[in-house]
């Protein structure tokens, strides 16, 4: 019986976390117009 209560509690906590993240929404931001450097520049 304790295992069932623990499973139900864990499920409720996980559901609460999902609802909280959904309520916060996606973070506002954008992508950089500059491409990322993939190589190290040559030293003089």
Image: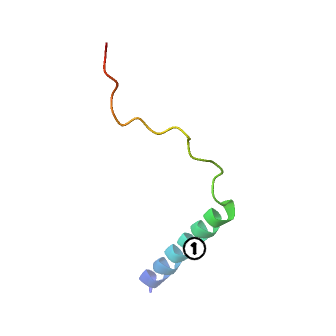
Q: Residue at x 46, y 84 (%)?
A: 4
Relative to residue 15, is residue 34 depicted above or below? above
Relative to residue 25, is residue 5 depicted above or below? below
Left or right: where does residue 44 sit relative to residue 15?
left
Relative to residue 44, is residue 13 depicted above or below? below
Left or right: where does residue 10 sit relative to residue 43?
right
**Local secondary structure at mark 1:** helix
Q: How many marks?
A: 1
Q: Quadrant of residue 41?
A: top left
Crowding around mark 1 (Cα neighbors within 10 Å: few <14, some 14 to 19, many 20+) is few
Q: Residue extending furthest right?
A: 23
Q: Residue at x 56, y 70 (%)?
A: 13
Q: Position of residue 11 (x, y in %)?
A: 52, 76
Left or right: where does residue 39 sit relative to residue 33?
left
Q: Residue at x 52, y 37 (%)?
A: 34
Relative to residue 26, is residue 42 depicted above or below? above
Q: Residue extending furthest bottom?
A: 1
Using the image as rendered, state which of residue 42 and residue 5 is in the foreground: 42
Using the image as rendered, state which of residue 42 and residue 6 is in the foreground: 42
Q: Position of residue 30 (x, y in %)?
A: 61, 47
Q: How is the image coloured?
A: rainbow
Q: Position of residue 28 (x, y in %)?
A: 66, 51
Using the image as rendered, state which of residue 37 and residue 9 is in the foreground: 37
Q: Which quadrant does the N terminus fall into?
A: bottom left
Q: Position of residue 24 (x, y in %)?
A: 67, 60
Q: Residue at x 57, y 73 (%)?
A: 15
Residue under pointer 1: 15
Q: Which quadrant does the C terminus fall into?
A: top left
Left or right: where does residue 21 sit relative to residue 5?
right
């Amino acid at each position: 019986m304790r295992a069932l209560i623990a499973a139900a509690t864990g499920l409720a906590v996980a559901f609460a976390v999902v609802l909280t993240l959904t309520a916060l929404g996606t973070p506002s931001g954008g992508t950089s117009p500059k491409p990322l450097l993939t190589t190290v520049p040559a030293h003089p």
